[in-house]
Image: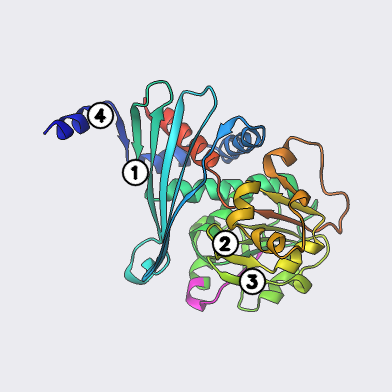
C-alpha cells in the first residue's frame, strides 16, 4: 500500500511524453540544431565534464536480441538521464520494430523523476544517426564521390537522411542481403532526394564509394582491408555490443585517422576491440571524437583513410532527452 502511494506521488510529479510528441518535436527541429547538441555533447564528454558509468548489457539468443542500459550526467547540470533500449532483430518477421525502449529524465538537484520519454527506441535511433552526421561534418573527404550504406534497416536509413545536411553528394550505393529489403529502402520517401543504387556485392560498393557507413548487427567482418580505396572514410555503427564486428581488423592498419566516440567503450565492445586485441594497432593511435572536434586537425591529404567507431555514448542520450524534455514541457 505504501509502495503504491509512493509510486503515485512520484509519477504525479513527472510528465509522460509520448512517441507522437517526441516525433513532432524532432520534426519541428532543424537538422543543424540537432547535430549541434550531439556535437557539443561529444566535446563535453572528451573534456571530462560528463559522468558516464560502464554500459549495462543483456544479451538474448532465442530470439536474438540485446538490451543496452546507458546513463549519466553532465557535471553541474540540472538533469541526469537513464536510457534503456532494446534491439530484437527477428521482430520485423512478426510485424514489430526491432527497436524499443524509453528514457527517464531526473533532476540532478533532488533525484526527482521529471519525465518519462516513451520513445520506443526512436530517440536512440535518432541520436545514433546524428552522431554519424557529426562524424561526417569533421571527417568526410572534401569531395564525396558516392556514399556507401551497408545495411537496409532503420539506422541505415536515418544515417543517410541526416547526412543530407552535411554532405552534398546524392549518389548512394546500398548493400543488403535481402533484395526485398533493399527495394523497400530505395523507395523510402524519407530518402527521395538521393539517387540510390542497390547491390549484393559489397566490393561494388567499396570500389565506388569514398564515404561508407556500416549499420548491421554482424558478428563477422563485412568489409575487408584490400577492398577499401585510398581516401575513403568509414563510419562503423553496428558493433555496439561484445561479439559484433563489421570491419576487418587488418583494415585499421591502413587508416591514418582512427576516431572513437568513446575510447573505453570501443576498446571493450566496438569494432576497435579486434585490431587492438590482436596488436594490429595500439590504443594510443585512437583519438576520441570530442577531442578531434576540439582541435584544428583535418584530413592531411586526399589519400587518407579514416575510420570512426561509434558504440553509442550516454552523453548522446543525455543531450537528446534534455532537448526533447525542455522543448515539450510547455
Pick whichever of labels 3 and 4 is earlier in the sequence. Answer: 4
Check residue 118 in the rendering and tell me which mark sits there, or answer none.
1
For image coordinates 62% across by 53% down, the residue present is 266
Pick whichever of labels 2 and 4 is earlier in the sequence. Answer: 4
Between marks 2 and 1, how big is the CA–CA gap? 24 Å
Residue at which label 3 appears: 221
Between marks 1 and 3, how big is the CA–CA gap? 34 Å
Q: Secondary structure at mark 1?
A: loop
Residue span colored magenta = 172-181
- Labels 2 & 4 near each other (Cβ < 8 A): no
**Residue 245: horizontal and vertical position, in percent?**
60, 66
- Labels 1 & 3 near each other (Cβ < 8 A): no
Decide which of 316, 182 is in the foreground and name it. 316
For image coordinates 58% across by 39% down, the residue present is 38
Image position of 40 with respect to 228: above or below: above
Residue at which label 4 appears: 10
For image coordinates 77% across by 63% down, the residue present is 280
Image position of 8 with respect to 258: above or below: above
Q: Nearer the viewer, mark 2 or mark 4?
A: 4
- Labels 2 & 1 near each other (Cβ < 8 A): no
Check residue 215 in the rendering and tell me which mark sits there, or answer none.
2
The N terminus lies in quadrant: top left
Amino acid at each position: 500500500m505504501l509502495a503504491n502511494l509512493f509510486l503515485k506521488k512520484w509519477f504525479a510529479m513527472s510528465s509522460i511524453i509520448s512517441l507522437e510528441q517526441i516525433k513532432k518535436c524532432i520534426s519541428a527541429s532543424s537538422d543543424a540544431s540537432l547535430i549541434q547538441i550531439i556535437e557539443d555533447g561529444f566535446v563535453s564528454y572528451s573534456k571530462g565534464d560528463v559522468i558516464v558509468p560502464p554500459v549495462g548489457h543483456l544479451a538474448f539468443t532465442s530470439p536474438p536480441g540485446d538490451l543496452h542500459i546507458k546513463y549519466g550526467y553532465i557535471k553541474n547540470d540540472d538533469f541526469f538521464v537513464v536510457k534503456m533500449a532494446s534491439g530484437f532483430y527477428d521482430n520485423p518477421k512478426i510485424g514489430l520494430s526491432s527497436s524499443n525502449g524509453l528514457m527517464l529524465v531526473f533532476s540532478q538537484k533532488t533525484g526527482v523523476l521529471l519525465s518519462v520519454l516513451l520513445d520506443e527506441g526512436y530517440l536512440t535511433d535518432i541520436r545514433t544517426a546524428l552522431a554519424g552526421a557529426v562524424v561526417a561534418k569533421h571527417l568526410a573527404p572534401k569531395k564525396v564521390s558516392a556514399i556507401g550504406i551497408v545495411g537496409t534497416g532503420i539506422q541505415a536509413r536515418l544515417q543517410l537522411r541526416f547526412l543530407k545536411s552535411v554532405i552534398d553528394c546524392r549518389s548512394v550505393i546500398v548493400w543488403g542481403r535481402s533484395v526485398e529489403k533493399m527495394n523497400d529502402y530505395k523507395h523510402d520517401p524519407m530518402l527521395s532526394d538521393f539517387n540510390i543504387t542497390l547491390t549484393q556485392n559489397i566490393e561494388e560498393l567499396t570500389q565506388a564509394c569514398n564515404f561508407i557507413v556500416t549499420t548491421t548487427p554482424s558478428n563477422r567482418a563485412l568489409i575487408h582491408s584490400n577492398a577499401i580505396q585510398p581516401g575513403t572514410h568509414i563510419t562503423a555503427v553496428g558493433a555496439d555490443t561484445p561479439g559484433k564486428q563489421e570491419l576487418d581488423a587488418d583494415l585499421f592498419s591502413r587508416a591514418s585517422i582512427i576516431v572513437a566516440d568513446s575510447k573505453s567503450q570501443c576498446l571493450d565492445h566496438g569494432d576497435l576491440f579486434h585490431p587492438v586485441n590482436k596488436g594490429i594497432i595500439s590504443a594510443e593511435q585512437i583519438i576520441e571524437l570530442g577531442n578531434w572536434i576540439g582541435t584544428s586537425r583535418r584530413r592531411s591529404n586526399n589519400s587518407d583513410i579514416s575510420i570512426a567507431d561509434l558504440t553509442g555514448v550516454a552523453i548522446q542520450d543525455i543531450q537528446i532527452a534534455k532537448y526533447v524534455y525542455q522543448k515539450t514541457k510547455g
